[in-house]
């Protein structure tokens, strides 16, 4: 049996459109100004970013939830990007295809803010 870890990602409308085009199975390549892909480790942190940042900058924000094989995730140390609950994984852009290959199931939208 494969053990998985649940991750969340605050997502803007354009990124969500690209995820939908993949059949909700993969994250799109990073733009040149985005050297890392950062999923977060708790839903509350993802909600705060989607609601407070994405809505202001993109007009809408979404929180997505997805599972990744835990064994694969061990290569990415947890990064504390602020307070004790502001935890992220930093996946280098060039490793995103491999990261996507370890997603189990679909990427789901669990919250929407406008």
Image: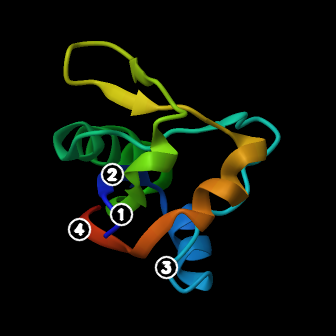
Residue 92 on image: x %, y %: 69, 36
Q: Is residue 60 visible?
A: no
Q: Residue at x 38, y 49 (%)?
A: 70
Disc 2 is placed on an element classified as strand
The residue labelled by disc 4 is 110
The numbered dot on residue 24 is 3
Residue 52: quarter of image: top left
Side of 72 relative to 2 (left or right): right
Residue 110 on image: x %, y %: 23, 68
Q: Quadrant of the N terminus?
A: bottom left
Disc 3 is placed on an element classified as loop
The numbered mark, 3 or 4, whose residue comes first in the sequence reads 3
Q: CA distance from mark 3 to mark 2?
A: 14 Å
Q: CA distance from mark 4 to mark 1?
A: 10 Å
In this view, the residue in front, 72 or 57, is: 72
Q: Is residue 78 above or below residue 97?
A: above
> Label 2 near label 1: C-beta < 8 Å?
yes
């Amino acid at each position: 049996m494969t053990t998985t870890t649940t991750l969340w990602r605050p997502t803007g409308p354009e990124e969500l459109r690209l995820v939908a085009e993949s059949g909700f199975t993969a994250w799109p390549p990073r733009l040149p100004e985005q050297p890392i892909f950062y999923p977060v480790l708790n839903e509350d942190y993802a909600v705060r970013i989607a609601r407070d940042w994405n809505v202001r900058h993109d007009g809408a924000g979404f929180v997505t939830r997805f599972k990744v094989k835990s064994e694969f995730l061990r290569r990415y140390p947890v990064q504390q990007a602020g307070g004790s609950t502001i935890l992220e994984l930093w996946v280098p852009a060039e490793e995103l295809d491999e990261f996507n290959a370890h997603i189990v199931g679909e990427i789901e939208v669990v919250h929407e803010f406008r």
